[in-house]
Image (tube, rainbow, N blue to C red):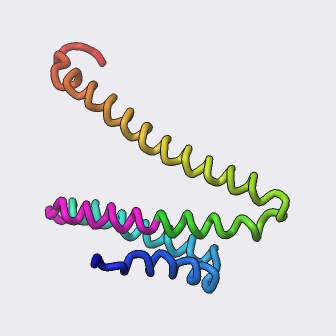
Amino acid sequence: MPDAGGEFVVVGLGEGGAEYGGKRIMIGTDLAAVAVVTVVPLCWTAGVPSVPVLYAVALLLGALTVLQQAASITMVPEIVDDSRTHPANARIAGAFSLADMAGTYGGTSSYASSARSAPLAATWPAGWKR
């Protein structure tokens, strides 16, 4: 039988969210995400970048994102009236989707444009003005 520990962690987050409050969780996850992402340039500066470190950063950042989004959704009923909860939840879901698409496609297009311009910059004749 597979280990069922993950389900208990996810179920427990709902109780923790009610106990600690959405604002605290959101601020805590943002600060933790800053600390997690800071590991990458620190490893690069120290000269020890590695794939396992990047995997750990991606895993922790994904877990923090889930916590942050869950906390932000639980705060909606505190902010809006009961009659407007459904449209507010729909707007939050749309904002999450838009942010995911903008990050994914923005990063991809940025990388693609720099990857296409790199060969041009490397072969640019020295006497030509840029």
In the image as oriented, which residue stretches furthest toward the front? 1
- Was residue 81 drawn as part of the magenta stretch in this picture? no
18, above or below 43, in the image? below
Front-lying residue, 6 or 43: 6
Please give the range of residues in magenta: 45-64
Rendered location of residue 8, percent (x, y): 44, 81
Question: In percent of the image, x 36 and y 37: which residue is there?
Answer: 108
**117 lies above or below 89:** above
Residue 60 included in the magenta stretch of the image: yes
Which quadrant, please, contains the C terminus? Answer: top left
Q: Is residue 89 left or right of residue 100?
A: right
Q: Position of residue 122 (x, y in %)?
A: 17, 25
Give the dominant element type of the magenta stretch: helix, strand or loop: helix
Corner quadrant of residue 52: bottom left
The residue drawn where x is 51% and y is 82% is 12
Tell me which residue sits at (73%, 55%) in the image.
88
Residue 66 at x, y percent in the picture: 48, 65
Direction from residue 75 to residue 3 in the image, left or right: left
In which quarter of the view is residue 126 placed?
Answer: top left
Above or below 50: residue 7 = below
**Residue 70, percent from left and from top:** 57, 67
Extreme residue toward the bottom, this view = 19
